[in-house]
Amino acid sequence: MVIKRAIGNLIQNCINHNEQGCKIYVSVSAENSSCTITVADDGIGATNEQIEKLNNAPHYMVCDVNVTEQRHGLGLLIVKQIIEAHGGGLAIEHSSYNGFCVKITLPMYMAGQ
Ligand SMILES: Nc1ncnc2c1ncn2[C@@H]1O[C@H](COP(=O)(O)OP(=O)(O)O)[C@@H](O)[C@H]1O
Ligand SMILES: [Mg+2]
């Protein structure tokens, strides 16, 4: 499943970008009609500028899928596109553990509603 792969890649990012190691915190919560999946770490994190850039990168910067996949798995911007294609959203933030955090929100469709 593509969402599972996307989350696997966020976890892999925590590992790849923290050579000295880090704790990884994955959580899921549901409110009303949406579900939020958070992958956070207590590693080196990123600067405000990096975070701003990643959150606002236009989709044409998502260039060569194959090259990116060979290197580090799906890139963040590709993961963002996948989530948006599922009607959800992705936000990159500082984590409350002083590291990096990616928050995915997906709509939930309840039977009978
Ligand atoms: N968990 C993380 N901790 C610190 N920086 C991160 C983390 N995840 C992503 N980044 C930063 O965001 C950039 C973009 O991530 P990504 O698109 O997955 O590219 P890649 O992992 O191939 O470098 C990374 O190059 C890195 O600078
Ligand atoms: Mg990566």
Image (tube, rainbow, N blue to C red):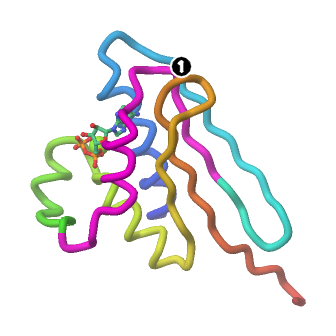
| Secondary structure at numbered mark 1 | loop
Circle 1 sits on which residue? Answer: 23
Expressed as whole percent of the image width and height from the top left, the position of residue 67 reads 10, 54
**Left or right, 19 with reference to 66:** right
Q: Amino acid at mark 1?
A: Lys
**Left or right, 41 with reference to 37:** left
Q: Is residue 12 magenta?
A: no
Which quadrant holds residue 48?
top left
Expressed as whole percent of the image width and height from the top left, the position of residue 75 reads 28, 52
Q: Nearer the viewer, residue 69 or 87?
A: 87
Furthest-bottom residue in view?
112
How many numbered marks have been drawn onto this rendered protein structure? 1
The image quadrant where one finds ligand 2 is top left
Residue appearing at x 80%, y 58% in the figure:
30
Eyeballing the image, is 72 above or below 110? above
Eyeballing the image, is 8 above or below 61? above
Q: Is residue 57 magenta?
A: yes
Residue appearing at x 44%, y 20% in the figure:
43
Residue appearing at x 15%, y 42% in the figure:
71
Which quadrant holds residue 44?
top left
